[in-house]
Image (spheres, rainbow, N blue to C red):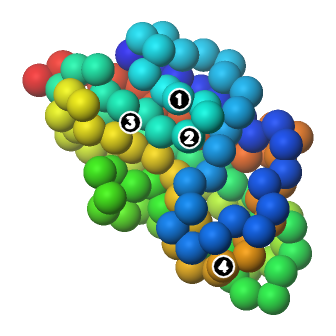
Amino acid sequence: MAFTAVKVADQTDVGNNQNILFEKVVLNEGNAFHPHTGVFTAPVSGVYCFQAMVMVRPQSQPFVASITHDGEDIVYTQGQNGYDLSPASVVIRVQAGEDVWVRNIVYIATNIVGHSYSSFSGFLLWES
């Protein structure tokens, strides 16, 4: 199980707790990543590594997003100024059927840059 997806189109006015969409799938081994929702659904239980990088346009407040596992924010990524690249990575145990995604969690009108500057990836380290 492994996936990498990138954001091609800008995503404007992203609301609080709204998913960030990564519409261009580069790799989707196991077909567990869903680009129309930005959600990875684990096909098997195990330990996974997830990485996200998000770039935002200039705005008046800091940008904060999280890699989210079944509704719980696990690790944050933040940008202070426009065009900051904000990476985050995490290794977590995920049960089959559970979801992992990236969402905006603070600023209510975030504008995320596409053009392959923003990405979301994950892969299975081992089944358990």
Q: Residue at x 39, y 43 (%)?
A: 100
Residue occupying the far left of the picture: 128
**Amino acid type of the residue that numbered disc 1 sits on in the rendered structure:** His
The N terminus is located in which quarter?
A: top left
**Viewed as shown, does residue 51 lie left or right of 55?**
left
CA gap between label 3 and label 1 equals 17 Å
The quadrant in which residue 42 appears is: top left
CA gap between label 2 and label 1 equals 6 Å
Q: Circle 1 sits in a helix, a strand or a loop, which is it?
A: strand
Q: Circle 3 sits in a helix, a strand or a loop, which is it?
A: strand
Query: Is residue 19 visible from the viewing direction of this image?
Result: yes
First in residue order: circle 3 vs circle 2: 2
CA gap between label 4 and label 1 equals 24 Å
**Amino acid type of the residue that numbered disc 4 sits on in the rendered structure:** Ile
First in residue order: circle 4 vs circle 3: 3
Q: Which residue is mark 3?
A: 49
Where is 65 relative to 43, above or below? below
**Where is residue 73 drawn, in percent x and y?**
37, 64
Residue occupying the far top of the picture: 29
Q: Which residue is mark 4?
A: 108
How crowded is the residue under tag 3: few (<14 C-alpha within 10 Å), some, or many (20+)?
some
Q: Which residue is mark 2?
A: 38
Query: Is residue 47 visible from the viewing direction of this image?
Result: no
Q: Which residue is mark 1?
A: 34
Question: Are the two marked residues, 2 and 1, in contact with CB atoms closer than 8 angstroms?
Answer: yes
Q: Residue at x 84, y 51 (%)?
A: 10
Nearer the observer: mark 3 or 2; the answer is 2
